[in-house]
Image (cartoon, rainbow, N blue to C red):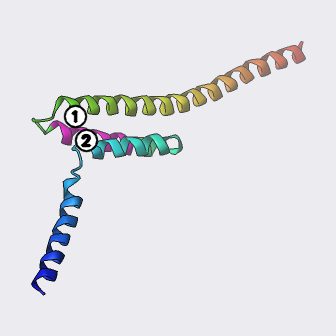
Amino acid sequence: MKKLFMAALLGGASLLCLGSCEQKSRVDELKEFVEKVQEEGSSYTEKQWEEVNDEFSKLLDKLNEYEDMTPEELQEVAKLQGEFAAKAFKEQAGKAMEKAGAVLDGFMQGLTNDNDEEEESE
């Protein structure tokens, strides 16, 4: 009975160690966040982008509180910042270009309509 109890105790301890020994990096939360934004960002509204930018800033602030980050962690954070910035710029600039295109189309249509009206009145 003692042997069975000890075996169960050792087995339980092993499982606990395996679960906690795989320690997550301090950067993992930021990495998961950036990956999510890369996957879903193209469908975000302007309001969602504002919320995402706020959350990203909070995650960076949290990481900046650590004074003992390794060079590898700092490099990973810099890489993730670049990936996030590129995605945000791509999505937001693309939507701005769409709006600008619509404005330009309206402008051109206004110009051509004015020319058509002038020709008709002559």
Which residue has dot 1 on it? 73
Along the polypeptide, which appears first: circle 1 or circle 2? Answer: 2
Residue at image x 74%, y 23%?
109
Query: On the picture, is 18 further left or further right than 36?
Result: left
**Nearer to the camera, 111 or 52:** 52
Which residue has dot 2 on it? 27
Amino acid type at circle 1 is: Glu
**Nearer to the camera, 7 or 50:** 7
The residues bearing labels 1 and 2 have C-alpha atoms spaced at a distance of 7 Å
Amino acid type at circle 2 is: Val
Q: Is residue 71 above or below residue 57?
A: above
Give the position of the N terminus as an image quadrant. bottom left
Residue at image x 27%, y 33%?
77
Q: Secondary structure at mark 1?
A: helix
Is residue 97 part of the magenta span, yes or no? Answer: no
The answer to whether marks 1 and 2 mark residues whose Cβ atoms lie closer than 8 Å is: yes
Is residue 55 part of the magenta span, yes or no? Answer: yes
Q: Magenta part mainly helix, strand or loop?
A: helix
Magenta residues (range) = 50-64
Query: On the picture, is 95 further left or further right than 6?
Result: right
